[in-house]
Image (tube, rainbow, N blue to C red):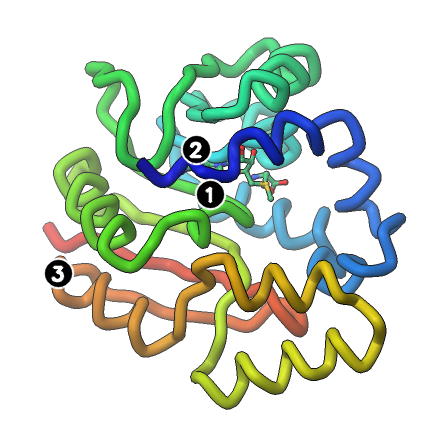
């Protein structure tokens, strides 16, 4: 469930860090300011943190350097292998947004970068319900991900990508489950979270959802 992209991530793992550092022209704008965005997210997180879709542990490492306890969840074995090499201090587990080991650690922050869009709408709703159960009172969900302001914005971004010859990106924007701002706002609000959004680059947004007392 929600892990249909894992084969792709196993293959992408060895060159993933090249892509996020801007070396892939198709995805340069998607990852524009990547390190700064992750640094901001890391700084907002409160320990102990649970991180989903850790990839090659770029965000994980930043939180560990801030002396935070991080429990990482990642479904791709190749991504996990690299993450363990780059960040042996974090506890990494096989799992995904919906299925993961139930640990006793009280979680203050649930974080994720560039991964929540792998879930369909109903899976996102289910994941948010589970996060609510998992988080301590006043805990926070803090995500960075591509999202669309609305349908017109989605179509404009797809057209833009096509015009630039970025056909893989255009296909991703069409086929992956990037959320719409209002839809995500409703999902978090319905679960009782106070949510805010901040645009970080042409594609990526910071999503902060705070649980009540
Ligand atoms: C674009 S990468 C982002 C990696 C890292 N968080 C970063 O910011 O560079 C997406 C990651 O999400 C993982 N992923 C895919 N489906 C997932 C799911 N259903 N639950 C959790 N993680 C998932 C992938 O294996 C991959 O490591």
Image quadrant where residue 98 sits: top left
Is the CB of the residue bearing disc 2 within 8 angstroms of ligand 1? yes
Circle 3 Cα neighbour tier, 10 Å, few/some/many (<14 / 14–19 / ≥20): some
For ligand 1, tell me if the residue under mark 3 lies within 8 Å: no
Q: Secondary structure at mark 1?
A: strand
Residue sitting nearer the eye, 6 or 29: 6
Quadrant of res 87: top right
Q: Badge 2 is on which residue?
A: 51
Contact between labelled residues 3 and 1, with CB atoms less than 8 Å apart? no
In depth, the one of 87 and 81 nearer the eye is 81
Position of the N terminus by quadrant: top left
Find out whether the residues at labels 1 and 2 contact each other: C-beta distance under 8 Å.
yes
Q: Residues within 10 Å of mark 2 (few under 14, many from 20)?
A: many
Q: Residue at x 74, y 74 (%)?
A: 161
Q: Give the distance between the C-alpha atoms of the residues marked 2 and 3, in whole angstroms.
A: 21 Å
Q: Earlier in the sequence, mark 1 or mark 2?
A: 2
> What is the spatial separation of the Cα atoms under label 1 and label 2, in whole angstroms?
6 Å
In x, y percent, where is residue 212?
14, 55
For the residue with label 1, is its CB less than 8 Å from the closest atom of ligand 1?
A: yes
Name the spot of residue 25 as percent of width and height, x first.
87, 59
Residue 192, numbered label: 3
Q: Is residue 78 left or right of residue 133?
A: right
Q: CA distance from mark 1 to mark 3?
A: 20 Å
Looking at the rendered structure, the secondary structure element under dot 2 is strand
Q: Is residue 29 above or below residue 53?
A: below
Where residue 179 appears, x then y in whole percent? Answer: 41, 66
Image-quadrant location for residue 208: bottom left
Q: Is residue 63 left or right of residue 128?
A: right
> Earlier along the polypeptide chain: callout 2 or callout 3?
2
Marking on residue 112: 1
């Amino acid at each position: 469930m929600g892990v249909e992209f894992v084969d792709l991530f196993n293959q992408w793992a060895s060159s993933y860090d090249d892509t996020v550092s801007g070396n892939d022209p198709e995805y340069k704008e998607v990852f524009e300011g990547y390190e700064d965005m992750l640094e901001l997210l890391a700084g907002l997180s409160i320990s102990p943190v649970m991180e989903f879709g850790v990839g090659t542990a770029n965000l994980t490492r930043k939180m560990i350097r801030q002396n935070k306890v991080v429990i990482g969840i990642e479904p791709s074995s190749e991504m996990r292998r690299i993450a363990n090499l780059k960040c042996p201090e974090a506890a990494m587990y096989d799992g995904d947004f919906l299925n993961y080991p139930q640990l006793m650690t009280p979680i203050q922050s649930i974080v994720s970068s560039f991964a929540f869009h792998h879930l369909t709408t109903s899976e996102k709703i289910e994941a948010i319900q589970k996060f609510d159960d998992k988080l301590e009172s006043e805990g926070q969900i803090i995500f960075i991900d591509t999202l669309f302001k609305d349908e017109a914005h989605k179509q404009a971004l797809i057209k833009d990508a096509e015009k630039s010859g970025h056909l893989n990106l255009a296909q991703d924007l069409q086929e992956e489950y990037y959320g719409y701002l209002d839809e995500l706002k409703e999902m978090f609000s319905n679960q009782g979270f106070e949510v805010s959004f901040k645009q970080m680059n042409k594609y990526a947004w910071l999503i902060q959802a705070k649980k009540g007392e």
